[in-house]
Amino acid sequence: MMDEMTIRMAIRATARISFGLFLGAFLGNALYRLVPASATRWLKANKDGFVLGFAASHTVHLAFILALVGAIGREHAFKGIMVVAFTTGFLFIYALAAGVLFRLPFWSSRFEALAHYYLATLFVVSFTRHAITRPLFYTPFVLVAVTATGVRIAAAIRSRSVPALAESR
């Protein structure tokens, strides 16, 4: 059986791995819209794989959280955690994965965008909370998450303005 410190290290490691996979899913289309190149084309083409990898990694993350609950108790494990926000986050992750796996007919790009922005916000909030106590380690994660959100917004703005620019010529 793992001790509390080992479980907490595993929780942090799986969160960071999940973040990397999330970035691939979150930025796949956006980066290609902004910079159409072979690398961004590959990222866009593999977006679904990043979504599924993210869901798998976060399932392992959840297993470690549940192991922590088992090891130290619910009241200690969830101390300072936004349980409803993170539970909603897991539901969004699994909804995104279901959309990839089952190509659901009611699936919409608006729902996908909502889920992605919600999850990006959770990463920003979580990394920011950790940056308060460990700024040298977590500040880069905050900056990457905020920058990724900015890139996604810039791509959305550009994709909406390009047809208008083409019509005005």
Image (tube, rainbow, N blue to C red):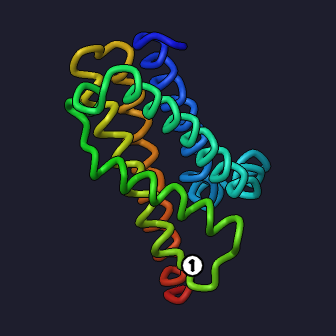
**Relative to residue 151, is residue 44 drawn left or right?**
right
Report the front residue among 161 and 81.
81
Name the residue at 58% across, 35% down: 60
Name the residue at 43% across, 68% down: 157
Q: Amino acid at mark 1?
A: Trp
Whole-percent x, y for residue 29 in the image: 62, 60
95 up-or-down from 38: above or below: below
Report the front residue among 26 and 62.
62
Report the front residue among 35 and 151.
151
131 up-or-down from 121: above or below: above
**Relative to residue 46, is residue 157 drawn left or right?**
left
166 up-or-down from 135: above or below: below
**Relative to residue 87, is residue 54 drawn left or right?**
right
Residue 135: image quadrant is top left
User: Which quadrant: the C terminus?
Assistant: bottom right
Q: Secondary structure at mark 1?
A: loop
Whole-percent x, y for residue 24 in the image: 62, 46
19 up-or-down from 153: above or below: above
Whole-percent x, y for residue 125 in the image: 28, 39
Q: Which residue is mark 1?
A: 107
